[in-house]
Amino acid sequence: MMDKKHITERDIVLEIKDLQKSFGDNHVINGFNLKLYQGENLVIMGKSGSGKSVMIKCLVGLMELDSGSISVMDKDITNLDQRALDILRADIGFLFQGSALYDSMTVRENLEFPLRRHSDRFDETNTEAMVMEALESVGLIHAIDLMPSELSGGMQKRVALARTLILKPKIMLYDEPTSGLDPITSKEIIMLMQEIQKKYGTSSLIITHDVDCARVISDRMILLIDGTNYAEGSFADLSKREDPKIKAFFKNK
Ligand SMILES: Nc1ncnc2c1ncn2[C@@H]1O[C@H](COP(=O)(O)OP(=O)(O)O)[C@@H](O)[C@H]1O
Ligand SMILES: [Mg+2]
């Protein structure tokens, strides 16, 4: 007889089924599937131009899908209205490729921004404490009154991360979190992602083509080729495979 533990699926916090997305004749995503489980770090690796950002934009409603379905914590988000989508979005933190801070605002104002957008969910007398806590978790309290232009690339990324964390998302989406950063700063960001996972118990979807990042952070990986799931497994498993298409991901570096 099977133990109950084995037949009960772990909680799925996010699920994509048969996602398709084309731009004219450019069929970018051709039936992509994924399940993100509570508390895990799922890495999606794909070459540049393979549709990683398109997929994540469909996921957060910045782009419309052609077909397929996306559900977040058991709610189908493909057909939600704007209001419902906004509420749900507070549960999903999205760290853009590039940090996308508001250049004309100080670090503090950048962090206050999402709180104001979701003011129905948060007590505004708490703003100061929330800003401090988020900055503290990325080690940048001292930068609170600086402008983004006064920060290094790595610091900007950390502020962007703090701005995402301030809403205490249950799911974190990272689009190429280490791209454009030097190796040492990349390592710092990866460590920070791990700390955040521990501190907040988030589930994370990490899009990357950085092998080092994938090695360190992934519990599980999906390799995206030709717009679909080409292979899935742990880093240790996939990096041992003989398939040349899979090998290519792990070769450089
Ligand atoms: N808004 C858009 N309009 C037309 N084509 C797009 C658009 N966004 C992305 N694409 C195309 O989709 C493909 C995948 O892009 P992208 O998801 O950015 O790749 P990456 O895996 O590097 O993140 C590319 O061929 C790109 O040209
Ligand atoms: Mg991209």
Image: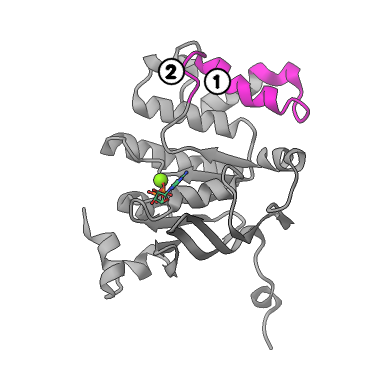
Where is residue 196? Give x, y as percent. 52, 40
Where is residue 231? Give x, y as percent. 41, 70
**Callout 2 secondary element:** helix
Observer-nearest residue: 126 or 89? 89
Q: Quadrant of residue 198?
A: top right
Observer-nearest residue: 59 or 135? 59
According to the image, label 2 marks what residue? 148
Q: Amino acid at mark 1?
A: Asn
Label 1 neighbour load within 10 Å: few <14, some 14-19, many 20+: many
Residue 102 colored in magenta in the image? yes
Visible residue check, residue 138? no
Visible residue check, residue 133? yes
Where is residue 143? Give x, y as percent. 45, 16
Instruction: Tell me the number on the disc at residue 110.
Output: 1
Q: Is residue 50 above or below residue 53?
A: below
The residue stretch that appears in magenta: 101-128
